Amino acid sequence: MKYFEHALIEQTFHRYLENPAIQIVSFDIFDTLFFRTCGTPSMVFEIMGMHEEVRAWFDTPSSFAHYRRTTERTLKAGGKEASLAEIYDALPIPLQQKNRFLEIELQTERDVLVLNPQLERWIDMAHSAGKQIILISDMYLSTQEITSIALSQLKNLNKISHIYVSCEQQKSKATGELFLHVMDDLNIKASQLLHIGDNPNADISIAKSFGIATLYYGLESNEKEAMHHEALYLKEVLPHGNHVRTLSLLCNPYDTALERFYFRLGASLFAPIIGELSHWLLACSHQFGLDKLLFLMREGAIFQHYFQKLYPHIATDRVYASRRSTQFLTLMPDDIGSLKPDTFKGLTLKDLYENFFIPFETSALHAYGDLSYEMLPTLYIEGKPLLEHVQEELNANKKRISDAFGAQKKLLCAYLDTLHVNTSSALIDFGGGGSVLKNLHPLFSPKTKPHTSILFYQSVRGYQNLNHQHTLSFLPHNAKTAHALECIARTPDFIEILLNGEHPTTVGYTKSSAQTEYLACNDLSMKTIQNALHAGIESFFSLARDYSLPSKTFSREHLALMLSRLIELPTHEEVKFLGALEYDEGRGSSHRYTIIQPEQIAQVKRQGEEVFYKHFLANPSHMKQHCIWPQGVLTTINQNFLLPFYGTNTHPNQKVIDTLLEKLGALKPKKIMIYGAGDLFKELLPFLHVRDIHIEAVIDSRAEIQPFISEDFRVFSLEEALRDKKEAVIVIASGVYGQSIQKKIEDFSKTTAKQIVVVTS
């Protein structure tokens, strides 16, 4: 339970419990005290729609889901807090089916609802602190139904004194009326109540407006934005496992932006990936009779660590081998004259000599050691390209190079013998070209050659390199993932940086062991980053164990897309921290570089974002030579630039939304009112949430006739919304009627002398 105890949100809860003024603690029920194991609450209707009895009346699950949601919204828009029976009564099906569908929905909810163990613990803590505990929910289910499908799971249900449900009281949190009813019923002041919930409006803003203490128990704006980008990129919300990701994120113990970010990355992305990789490796061990898994460093360290954590009975070991320590196997002394560019790309001249085991300190070219290999043909010394001088020196040392290659090969073979590799072993590497595995395989005898090679992912080049070996890839290469894997193959390197951690790179071999070298950490302190990343992974693993999360909760296809999303559609926060990481090139180079550099940003600004992105899409490989992470640079300049390419501009309201967001970005208001409670308002809402813009009121001319609810907001008339306000920022959420609404607001401002800033498209 230490992941609960150390969470910042739990420490905040502790402080509330220490406040003697707080006498009653109130919890929201759904998505707070209980989570749904399906992707979103509305997915319950999709799942229910698969039931054979439901499909007999609605041909597809989505058809039923639309009918079910629309009926509920229609009743709610009319000001009624409808019960489940009333919702089904309004559906166009016979009475017998209505009763049966109600039973099926309750059973579906029962199947997907799981208890939040942290909040069950909070109930005990509050009770021990002498607080009264109540539950408040805006819900169409009755107290009896909620108890049947959910609350019966609570071991401490007897510690809850009251349960208030909107459909029973005909009052909702969203309007504030349910809070007023609770305070009146319990005869308490607002200052005596603490309410905990996940809805920024109904649970937090409305409650705060009465003076009630609140604790927001939901995702932060940065986390919501990342989830939004993920759903856009995947074109769906993950169908399973998000409840564990969410609770892991809520357990974040850090208070610095850097550490909170890397904890989030570990909990929400790397943990699901590494967890499913471990389950899959176990399945491979059983299927192919593997008795030992050998993880190639440096990424192998993190893979082995968590695999052993889950499956300690399977034998594992680390193999110290790298591109640098095995590259000599691909170099032929007789071919020195060619010096193939692809082989040495990214190396400095000093690195090149070290790859051939030639002491660079005694070279006549010592002064040029820091030059990149790509520069050698362009510089002239004594009328000849520098590259020709290099070739001459290496040719002069051909015998020495040949002897060094032979000696290293013997030492490498001797090192491999110490690992006791056999035909029931598997070599595991990150991927995707499989170069190191390709280099190692010829060194094994038929009796010791590993049965299987395993790559985290395999690119097209990997299939070419290893087509004569039995090779498995964790991330599958198919029509859905091919583009994602090529993106990962052209990764801007931060994935390797984070997986490598502080582990040493292998530079060669001695008589006794592999020779390793620790690379200097950058100014961001890789130790701090790694601690936070691993804390996030550990949090997820602990909760996955507590929830008995099965293997294949996250499909391997989804995981491939989740990883490539981080590259192709990053958030501004992700770019800020990942772009600042520093990479050692990995081919054995001492050259280090930052993922995103100021000159790259300046270059894109000069060229123009659209022109730059067009060139990148036309030739990604070429562009990467000049700009390692094009999408990261574009997001640094304009955090919304990439979003339209992933579907957010398909709706006719998108241009209006973009204009409104641009103007709000310039104004930077902390709170706004919105005029218009229609579709545009609903589409604008998530963008406002991720920007932490508080909505004071929603206004609509229809409320002049009769108040109503939209998206859990009570909708007011203009006069009622501004009654106690001297000033306000009003965003007009209407494209067609924008001008007439603006005139109405301006006229109202003149007659009432209120200072109103109007934001319109």
Image (cartoon, rainbow, N blue to C red):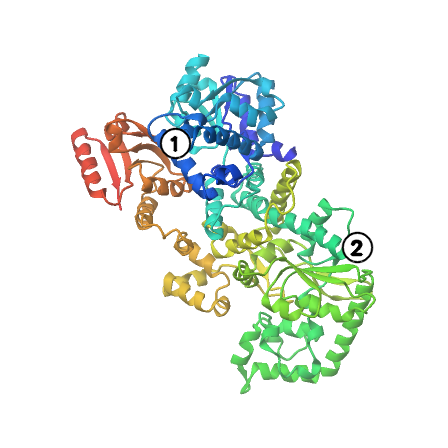
Q: In the structure shown, which secondary structural element does the residue marked by tag 1 occupy?
A: loop
**In the displayed structure, does residue 607 sit left or right of residue 428?**
left
Q: Residue furthest bottom?
A: 383
- Specify the quadrant of the image occupied by residue 239: top right
Q: Position of residue 13 (x, y in %)?
A: 54, 27
How crowded pointer 2 is (Cα within 10 Å; few <14, some 14-19, many 20+) is rated as some
Q: Position of residue 129 (x, y in %)?
A: 58, 18
Task: Say how many tags the image has.
Answer: 2
**In the displayed structure, does residue 704 sit left or right of residue 184?**
left
Q: What's under tag 2, amino acid-wise?
A: Asp
Q: Disc 2 versus disc 1: distance between alpha carbons? A: 56 Å
**Residue at the image position 56 percent from the left and 30 percent from the top:** 11
- Specify the quadrant of the image occupied by residue 676: top left
Q: What's under tag 1, amino acid-wise?
A: Asp
Name the residue nearer the viewer: 665 or 27: 27
Name the residue nearer the viewer: 86 or 447: 86
Quadrant of the snapshot with the N terminus: top right
Residue at the spot of label 1? 712
**Residue at the image position 61 percent from the left and 83 percent from the top:** 389
How crowded pointer 1 is (Cα within 10 Å; few <14, some 14-19, many 20+) is rated as some
In the rendered image, the vertical position of residue 468 relative to residue 71, given as above or below: below
Q: In the structure shown, which secondary structural element does the residue marked by tag 2 occupy?
A: loop
Q: Check if mark 2's residue and mark 1's residue have beta carbons within 8 Å.
A: no
**In the displayed structure, does residue 143 sit left or right of residue 752?**
right
Residue at the spot of label 2? 291
Name the residue nearer the viewer: 710 or 421: 710
